Image (spheres, rainbow, N blue to C red):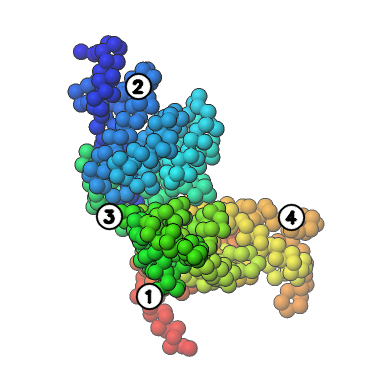
Amino acid sequence: MPMNPAELQLRFDEILADARVTTLLQPILDMAEGCIAGYEALARGPSDSALHAPQALFRMAEACGQVSQLDALCCDVAMATFARLRLPGRLFVNLTPGSLLDPAFGLEAVLERLARHGLERHRLIFEITENTAGFDYAALKRAVDALRVGGLEVAMDDFGEGFSSLRLWSELKPAFVKIDKHFVSGIDQDPHKLQFVRSIQQLAEGAHAAVIAEGVETRAEQAIMRDLGIRYAQGYLIGRPSSTPARLPPAQALNGLNGGPVSVFPMSGGHRPITAERLIIPATPVQADTRSEAVLDMMLRNPDLHAVAVLRDGVPVGIIHRPALLDRFINKFGRELFGRKPCSMIMEADPLIVDKATPIQDLSELVVRKGKQAFTQGFIITELGTYVGLGSGFDLMREVTQMQIVAARYANPLTGLPGNVPIQQHLERLLAGGQGFVTAYADLDQFKPYNDVYGFRRGDDMIRLLARLLRDAVNPELDFVGHIGGDDFVVLFQSDDWRARCKAMIDRFDEERLALFQADHVAAGGYRCEDRRGRVVFHALVSLSIGAVAIDPAHYTHYQEVARAASEAKHMAKRVDGSALFVEQRTRPSALRLAENVAAEAMR
């Protein structure tokens, strides 16, 4: 029999007074590492109560004006459950925006609560719903900034559910953004959802936030998330909410990570991004209660050691930089003053701490934002929050410089696009990974006469025009554009709509090329000039030919074979007057190609 409002309020008061709230925990999968990155805490009322469901429970709290009190209770129970189960990773706790402004969730109160449950501050993430109607954005931002200064981070929950998403994101600058499950469900069948989620991922990369996809229930949905470069996934495929959640990902979720390399490749040459893992310096850490003089002795015994990480329960909490330590002890009474004190009293308590999977480009930006101190004293590198080593600003600078040199060495100087070496490397990786793709060879027709009439400077403008149109027409998350040299380009497509993209390239080229011709030449459809034999003949306007070949790795094993097939398709396209796309429909078996190669070698 339904309860009346008075009975519901009485039952709610009993729940608060007796702490009759339980926590279910749902795992979050790190798809890059293949492990559980953390758990979201989901509150439930008493199972025999009309307030069992969280929606009913929080509606009653709002009616009673006690949302912050309920949030505080749910947070305490979640921490206690998480700590008791000794679960790995981070704990994600939902929090109503208004509770951020309550003293119960001020920095000191939160740190006291963490200490009471034996949890490190970096392991707690507050999930803030985007439903912030009526709240003061400036006040919310100040509250979040205060928590962040204390080493705590926030996540934005249910992104896309309401109308204030982008503003809340820009104001709060969350470390994590959780995509509402509506946009994940059935994404493999809905191109509009795919584009929406791809845009969120691009925004997140620019904002240095990690995306968590909620509601992942099928292998197809997981594959799309993985291919878009989204690192974290949550949903029934990974695990249902449970009072005793699994510590390891289920087989069906791990199998979804083994479908070949992620098909999200950078435009800069096709390598997976270099990460902070390359910069790890193995260095013995010290515990927070280690005497400062012991740290000094360690430094003196290891002159190459630029810093020492300070741990508490295996988790880094500070760093001691060599010059700063020596400054303490250089005074006459330095050892007497500081020697017996725990090193936690002299450490830098707010060091830069990064996961080993952090891309070098992101790491360099973090160091710059942190300031000179992070560059000189270095940074701590972790794996899922556990210390693995140190990194130095010098090594980071050297790696960034080397990356810039390599990029410049192999990029085409006219267009800035990857040249032959990155093209070959990208092809080889696609073939080795068993990835199906389409190779499109783009070439300009009647280009030499154009150079003769208009000059090389205008010819360079024509090449840059084509490079820009190719870049604009592809999906940078999936496709790769390379500049072979001169007026020859290649596009390695993994987009399903590659044919439409090729046609769009041709249509835009035919339209925009006209600005690079004289009006009378456009009206006549060409111009007269000498050909290669010195005869004055009529030449049509420059056009674009694209030869495309669908590459099945089962039939192609070497990049030279792909290049040969694409070149043949390009020559077929050039037989057509004007701009054209030729798609090679034949599939030659490997045995035939091997025979051709043997015959070609014999004739050399």
Q: Residue furthest right?
A: 520
* Depicted 150 relative to depicted 254: above or below: above
- Residue 442 seen in this snapshot: yes
Q: Provide the secondary structure element on which disc 3 rests.
A: helix
The amino acid on which the numbered mark 2 sits, given as a three-letter code, is Ala
Mark 1 is surrounded, within 10 Å at the Cα level, by few (under 14), some (14 to 19) or many (20 or more) other residues, namely few
Q: Amino acid at mark 4?
A: Ala
Q: Which residue is mark 3?
A: 255
Q: Residue 592 shows which numbered tag?
A: 1
Q: Amino acid at mark 3?
A: Asn
Label annotation for residue 515:
4
Q: What is the distance, in whole Å, between disc 1 and disc 4 at their CAs?
A: 46 Å
Q: Amino acid at mark 1?
A: Leu
Question: What SS does tag 4 mark?
Answer: helix
Q: Circle 2 is placed at which residue position?
A: 61
Label 2 to label 3, Cα distance in Å?
Answer: 42 Å
Per the model, the C-alpha gap separating discs 2 and 4 is 66 Å
Q: Is residue 453 left or right of residue 590?
A: right
Mark 3–mark 1 distance (CA, rounded to whole Å): 35 Å
Q: Is residue 515 above or below residue 133?
A: below
Instruction: Name the disc covering residue 202, or none.
Output: none
Disc 1 on helix, strand or loop? helix
Q: Nearer the viewer, residue 581 or 404?
A: 404
Observer-nearest of 544 and 416 = 416
Q: Who comes first in sequence, dot 1 or dot 4?
A: 4
N-terminal of the two: label 1 or label 2?
A: 2
Label 3 and label 4: CA atoms lie apart by 52 Å
Question: In this view of the protein, can residue 403 be seen by the observer?
Answer: no
